[in-house]
Amino acid sequence: MHILNKVLLAGAMLMPAAAAAEYIPTPEILESRQEFEDARFGVFIHWGIYSMFGQGEWYLNYGLDRDEYAKAASGFYPGSFDAKAWVSAIKDAGAKYICITSRHHDGFSMWDTAQSDYNIVDATPFGRDVLKELADECEKQGIRLHFYYSHIDWTRDDYPMGRTGTTTGKDPEKADWPHYYDFMNAQLKELLTGYGKVGAIWFDGWWDRDEDATPFDWQLDQQYELIHSLQPGCLVGNNHHQTPFEGEDIQIFERDLPGENKAGLSGQDISRLPLETCETMNGMWGYKVKDQNYKDVPTLIRLLAGAAGKGANLLLNVGPQPNGEIPAAALDRFKGLGEWLGKYGETIYGTKAGDFPAQSWGTSTRRGDKLYVHILSAEAPVIYVPTDRKVVSAVAFDDRKPVKFVRHQNGGVSLNLDSIPDTADYIVELTTK
Ligand code: GLC
């Protein structure tokens, strides 16, 4: 079935009340999608008053009372927050965009919103609009900023509770979707009119109502239209774990590369939209004091190359500390990734997925007539590369030394590396016809 029909069908099934009109992306959107695809690497930031508890961003959901939880705001003073230091470290890591939580499921807004006092300027002694500071710094240093925005709210009564946030003390009698929908759109309007050019709005929470007997109508199409009308180049993405709905510009995967489903959140069809996989650097999105299990630099390099090999971006998360600093362990990983991308970025940025699905030894990326073979975990010095194209030369990316290869009768080549590579990603550059 044609992908568009498939998407339309999915849209019609999931949003019966508002039959989605066909979405035709504007030239501005097509340009943003291209920029997004070329970026290949972004940094995700989960930061809010939940960081203070050091237990991750879902802490409120684990049996806390919303009013008790909210008291944390009066003690939130991230005195070490320095937008310049954040953006510099992220740029040095080689990331091309930042996506930050503007408001997570706890309902606390990290900017000076006029729609609720439960925000960083009105409810904390810190009183600074960190999103504004970050937006200004991103603009200055030339890196794109995206906003994560939760559709769920575990604090406000008007959000009609789904399957999470049921124990925070909300009054279900006061659920008022039209009121909540207006609130969200007014907030989105603030973010899209007062914070410079926004690269994308990254929604999360649709799955909160995915067990409803009657499908819940989130009125996404009007919301997406609002975003596109306020900023014609702003991409829309939704972490709903489904094949994209009408009006969306990117397809998001959580904790798995497209086509994989180790975390149990994926399995959806892969669309033709730009793809992005988000993944944690340790095991949690928001700061978790107990979780020091950070992936090492070689693992992160393989993750990035693996994503690029599938034609997807990696959105790699960090959870800053309550004092406003990015954990040292994360800064160390940033540095390692930056050094690696400084040498090998050509094989990642602006590439397309390679010619074949991931192999046991690794993956590949393509730019023009170059096929970059990323050898991530070879078990033997001879690697079979199942490309359909005719290989005319092969060199080690590092030192440009020729790599021996044999062409096979019915397609593909075998590369002979002499020995099993011992680097995180050993790259062979093939020139193909
Ligand atoms: C999940 C979680 C959320 C996190 C997000 C990031 O949807 O609910 O806490 O922000 O994944 O991908």
Image: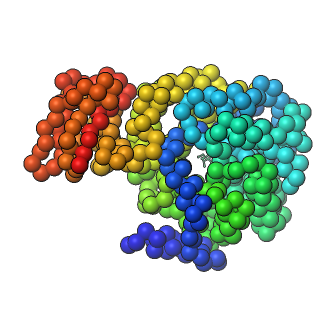
Name which residue lies at 64% across and 25% down.
327
Q: Residue furthest left?
A: 409
Name which residue lies at 75% across and 28% down.
82
- Residue 160 position, x and y percent, is 75, 63
**Residue 77 sits in quarter:** top right
**Residue 183 sits in quarter:** bottom right
Q: How is the structure coloured here?
A: rainbow
- Residue 126 position, x and y percent, is 86, 33
Q: Could you tell whether 234 is left or right of 187 in the image?
A: left
Name which residue lies at 79% across and 69% down.
178
Name which residue lies at 60% across and 32% down.
91
- Please give the count of numbered marks on the rendered protein: 0
| Nearer-the-camera pick, 130 or 263 | 130
| Nearer-the-camera pick, 404 or 129 | 404
- Residue 313 visible in the displayed image: no
Q: Could you tell whether 378 is left or right of 15 in the image?
A: left
- Residue 25 position, x and y percent, is 57, 66
Name the image quarter holding the N terminus. Answer: bottom left
Q: Could you tell whether 268 is left or right of 239 in the image?
A: left
- Residue 127 position, x and y percent, is 88, 36
- Residue 136 visible in the displayed image: yes
**Residue 293 sits in quarter:** top right
